[in-house]
Image (cartoon, rainbow, N blue to C red):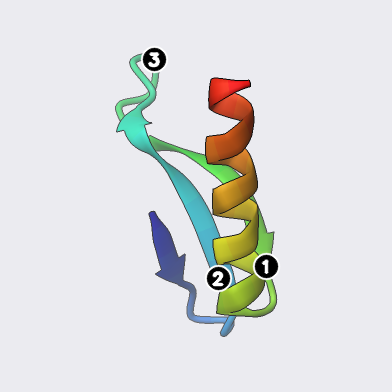
């Protein structure tokens, strides 16, 4: 899940919530949305390999 921050950057969050905090885990902050989407694909790849 990618959200745009007030600073204009994009942050990648996990789909599941962290049971300890009840919030989503931050999986990285990126300057462009395309960079965030690329990282999201990389994360999905490593989850299955």
Residue 23 in the figure: left or right of residue 13: left
**From what the image shows, is residue 9 above or below residue 15?**
below
**What crowding class fits label 1: few (fewer than 14 Cα within 10 Å), some (14-19), or many (20 or more)?**
some
Residue depth check, mark 3 versus mark 1: number of the one nearer the observer: 1
Q: Earlier in the sequence, mark 2 or mark 3?
A: 2
Q: Residue at x 60, y 75 (%)?
A: 34
Q: Is residue 23 visible?
A: no
- Helix, strand or loop at label 3? It is loop
**Residue 40 in the image: x percent, y percent?**
55, 51
**From what the image shows, is residue 37 above or below residue 5?**
above
Q: Is residue 46 visible?
A: yes
**Residue 38 in the image: x percent, y percent?**
63, 61
**Residue 7 in the image: x percent, y percent?**
58, 81
Mark 2–mark 3 Cα distance, whole angstroms, equals: 24 Å
Residue 26 in the figure: left or right of residue 1: right
Contact between labelled residues 1 and 3, with CB atoms less than 8 Å apart: no
Q: Earlier in the sequence, mark 3 or mark 1?
A: 3
Q: Earlier in the sequence, mark 1 or mark 2?
A: 2
What residue would you read off at disc 3? Answer: 20
Q: Nearer the viewer, residue 11 or 36?
A: 36
Q: Nearer the viewer, residue 48 or 34?
A: 48
Q: Residue at x 54, y 43 (%)?
A: 26
What residue would you read off at disc 2? Answer: 10
Q: On residue 30, which mark appears?
A: 1
Contact between labelled residues 2 and 1, with CB atoms less than 8 Å apart: yes
- Helix, strand or loop at label 2? It is strand
Residue positioned most to the bottom: 8
Q: Nearer the viewer, residue 26 or 1?
A: 1
Image quarter in which the C terminus is found: top right
Q: Residue at x 59, y 43 (%)?
A: 27
């Amino acid at each position: 899940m990618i959200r745009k921050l007030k600073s204009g950057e994009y942050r990648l969050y996990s789909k599941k919530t962290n049971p300890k905090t009840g919030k989503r885990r931050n999986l990285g902050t990126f300057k462009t949305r395309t960079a965030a989407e690329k990282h999201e694909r990389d994360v999905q790849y490593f989850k299955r390999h």
